[in-house]
Amino acid sequence: VPHVDVSDLRPQDGWRWRLEPVGAMRVPGVVFASRELLPDLADDRSIEQVANVATLPGIVGASYAMPDVHWGYGFPIGGVAATDVDAGGVVSPGGVGFDISCGVRLLVSPFLRDRVADRLPELLDRLDATIPRGMGPGGVWPVSGRQLRRVLLRGARYAVEQGHGVPRDLERCEDGGWVADADPEAVSDRALERGIRQVGSLGSGNHFLEVQVVDRVLDPGTADRLGLRAGQLCVMIHCGSRGLGHQICTDHVRVMLEAMPRHGIWVPDRQLACAPVRSVEGERYLAAMAAAANYGRANRQLLTRAVREAFAAVLGDGPLELLYDVSHNLAKLEIHEVGGRSRLLCVHRKGATRALPPGHPELPADLREVGQPVLVPGSMGTASYVLVGVAGGDAFFSTCHGAGRRMSRHAARRRVAGPRLRDELEASGVLVRPGSMAGLAEEAPFSYKDVDEVVATCEHAGLARRVVRLRPVGVVKG
Amino acid sequence: VPHTADLTLEAWGPTRSACLEEAVAGLLDATVSEVDRSAGTELPVQFGPAGDDAELLAEVLDEVLYLLDTAGVVVGADLEDRPDGAVGGWFTVVPPGAVTVVGAVPKAVTRHRLELRDRDGTWWGRVTVDV
């Protein structure tokens, strides 16, 4: 693929840019962005990555980039690509990412922020003391090898069966909280060793647990149907499948690098290593990926239990209801219409969220008329959003997954010291409980794109619709 | 080295094994400070021989990250090139409580722009680590 960058993009309308196929690209690139959100030419290689993804065997439609796109490895972060399974289409572990089934869930409380404001510091202290995070082992649920196997097979469903939640939680999870095609035999011992002591832990980096308040209701009808009103306290949990998922991706990238010559596949970036979905390597990766997806959902379910206990201890009784739980790092086999025909596609969403439209049969009955909730975590100190999928949603019903970084971690650390950032956040009404001060600085709000602009662009580009804006009042960082 | 979301490291040294030691040290420097080495234990390690040198760099750092979740923090590497093309030696590992974490914890080693090669008599490598 010849060198391409932002200057090769051609505007289609105000919100969509096209990269014509060049070299080995099999389909065009399509970037959804306002002019302001386009990556900076100098410090970003994400458009080159959009072009590289377009070379994958079996890719259909386009190599898509969401409005929060930024430079990743292999795929851009904010990338969506679908391959035609019955036409030699491939699955790429790098198109899912190391943090398999990393995602977001939102819990809605009956408490109004103004009524409980004086007890928030105590709530944050309790969360700080009980939520495992940061480096290495530690999780709220110590499991045996046999229990871990069941987590891999049945995900959040197993956690709920074991008393770590209520059945309604599962109705509000993507896939009912578990996928059926997981095979623990496809998971290496090293992955199991990494995962066994981390069930119910946040991790590090951009992962967080936030106490938020509904700041602005943008679609009152839909907000009402989702049980959201202004001033209400919510909790957003952003994390994934921890060391188990990281190891599974590592293992299968290596297997696919070795298998590619046998399948006659060449990729422009080794992190795009892939194999046909219908091959031993492809099927085995998908079975292991599904096990990690189940682990990720159980992980968020266990953190939910810990949050409910903290709320009950500090604020008293009042249900914390799960609004929705959705992944933004996953490959799914889905049926979509391409070129007038229904086809089975392997849809990779790497830092992108599925956004099913109203009426979609996979939605639970009480959400079918509304559309699938999409949870978009912003940077701490700014805002997060609840969106819903829309009819005719582009990019195989996908939308953004966050604000999207625009500054490197080192640059952020050089620009602000952790303690100062914490003081500034607290002065603006955000209580902060960081895992480390440098880690906090790396996640400073200025290192991200403007999340308000990102979600507005999603709406203008016909990818999703805004429902409410949430503002953090307390942040527990990894 | 700048990367928008993750961590890109460059390392160099007079030999391939010295360059790998520097890569381990670089990853440690980006992640922790104030290491208490008194609780360190030595762990024998061997890597490769790999099809190409870059894969060897990934293999060494993959092991560091695996140990991070299962054994402790690798705070030092003493490696040597073996005649068969492998690299062997020792990792010094301390418990997580013996270090102060200063940045996002690395998760995994990517193959994106991964390189390790002899550049005019100096071994040089580049690796991007997901954090």
Image (spheres, coloured by chain):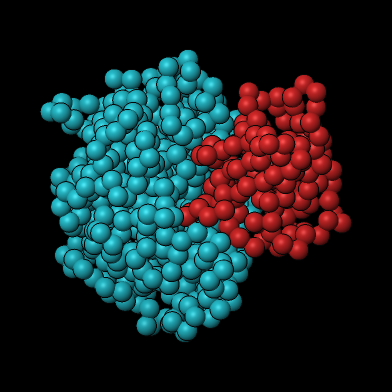
Q: Position of residue A455 (x, y in %)?
A: 27, 60
Q: Residue at x 16, y 65 (%)?
A: A221
- The residue furthest front is B120
Residue A468 visible (yes or no): yes
Q: Is residue B6 above or below residue A235?
A: above
Tell me what hue chain A is rendered in: cyan
Closer-to-camera residue (A47/A462): A47
Q: Position of residue A120 (x, y in %)?
A: 48, 78
Position of B76 with respect to A77 (left or right) is right
Closer-to-camera residue (A312/A21): A21
Closer-to-camera residue (B100/A34): A34
Residue A77 visible (yes or no): no
Determine the image quadrant of residue B126. top right
Q: How many marks?
A: 0
Determine the image quadrant of residue A361. top left
Q: Residue at x 20, y 54 (%)?
A: A15
Q: Residue at x 60, y 69 (%)?
A: A437
Give the position of the C terminus of chain A as an image quadrant.
bottom right
Q: Position of residue A451 (x, y in %)?
A: 33, 64
Give the position of the N terminus of chain A as an image quadrant.
top left
Tell me what hue chain B is rendered in: red
Q: Is residue A242 above or below residue A224?
A: above
Q: Position of residue A278 (x, y in %)?
A: 38, 19
- The residue furthest top is A262
Closer-to-camera residue (A84/A323): A84
Q: Residue at x 45, y 65 (%)?
A: A447
Q: Is residue A347 above or below residue A447?
A: above
- The residue furthest right is B38
Position of A95 with respect to A12 (left or right) is right
Q: Is residue B123 above or below residue A358?
A: above
